[in-house]
Amino acid sequence: METDKKFIRSFFIRTIFLLVVVITTVVIFDPFYQYHKPLPGLKAVLTDKEYQCIGTLRTFDYDALLVGSSVCENYNNHWFDEGFGCKTIKAIRSYGATADLCYLLDNAYENHDLEYVFYNIDPSSLSASTEPTYESTGCPMYLYDKNPLNDYPYLLNKDVLMEKLPYLLAYSFIRDYDEGNSYNWAQWKYFGQDLALGLYTRLPVVKNMQPETVNKKELSDNIALLTRQLEAHPETTFKFFFSPYSMLWWDNACRSGERDAVIYNEKQAVKTLLQYDNAEIYFYQDDREIITNLDNYMDIVHFSKDINYYIYDKLAKGEERLTMDNYEERLDGMRDLSQEIVEQIMPEYYDT
């Protein structure tokens, strides 16, 4: 009996010791950056945005954010550092909904003063729900809620200990990892016309065009989320920009009857945002040479890193900026270009 008690006591002590060692190891190296920025000598290895983005916003040193959806993941942060004289990290959400991105901004502003916010506006974000989607889409909320008492799925996680930590160390010391390429997915990806066309499911029947105000309530609410950021942070220069989706995306917008609402939403957003002194807006959607060359794309939306650099370079030079005098003309021109795509360019690829 006494032997059994000693065994149980010894087992209990060893178990507690092992748990303490595991927890301490995770806290010290912290691959999700929940508790601190990278240790001296280690790189910020960022590949899992749902698990790492929220922590970096709270613990890293920076004064600029690159905010947007998956089309922003292939920018190199160092481009913006050099072009704008700042320290940039990414605030990325694949869906790019306004509410989700503003949630990330709110977390960043809690402990940081931002000089710049480079904010990609996706067309769909202007008509999306204004409720954040992190919990409803299964994100690890124990990393988002600032409650260390429920961090055990992170601290006592076999994958974190056996995969994430070795990965962090390997990319810090063995692999030539560029910290500016956080969340980058372009490596080993193929971009080309055949792939883009192969992934495009074209609607067989053209639907009636929806009223342009079909999303008026959602639009108003999403614009309010953006203007609230502008009003709350007048010290920050917000550089909003619209990225060049491929002509396949515009073909689908026309065939689904959504094109007029997209243009209307963008007009209303631009008109409102331009009223703020700390807002600048840049428009790259209508670059004919880019959007009609499907070799730039891997699907109807996602473009190659060369296009990311092209957009950055334009942004750094202040080119293609919208003003109260030109924004309607530019957006009407996008509508005309989309019609040309449907009527003249797409027949080269499809019979109808």
Image: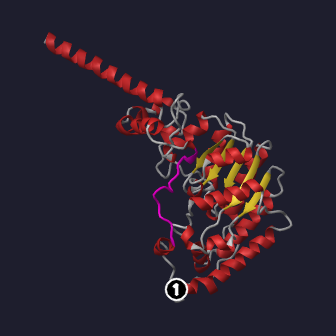
Q: Quadrant of residue 124?
A: bottom right
| x 72%, y 79%: residue | 336
**In this orientation, which residue lies closer to the viewer: 298 or 132?**
298
Q: Quadrant of residue 285?
A: bottom right
Give the answer, above or below, for where 284 lies relative to 35: below
Q: Please indicate whether residue 277 sits to the left or right of residue 5 in the image.
A: right
Camera sees residue 223: no
Residue occupied by mark 1: 350
Q: Main secondary structure of the magenta part?
A: loop
- x and y percentages locating residue 337 in the rendered image: 69, 78
Q: Please indicate whether residue 128 sits to the left or right of residue 34 in the image.
A: right
- x and y percentages locating residue 271 in the rendered image: 80, 63
Q: Please indicate whether residue 341 sits to the left or right of residue 323 in the image.
A: left
Q: Is residue 191 magenta?
A: yes
Q: Which residues are magenta?
A: 180-192
Give the answer, above or below, for where 145 lies relative to 79: above
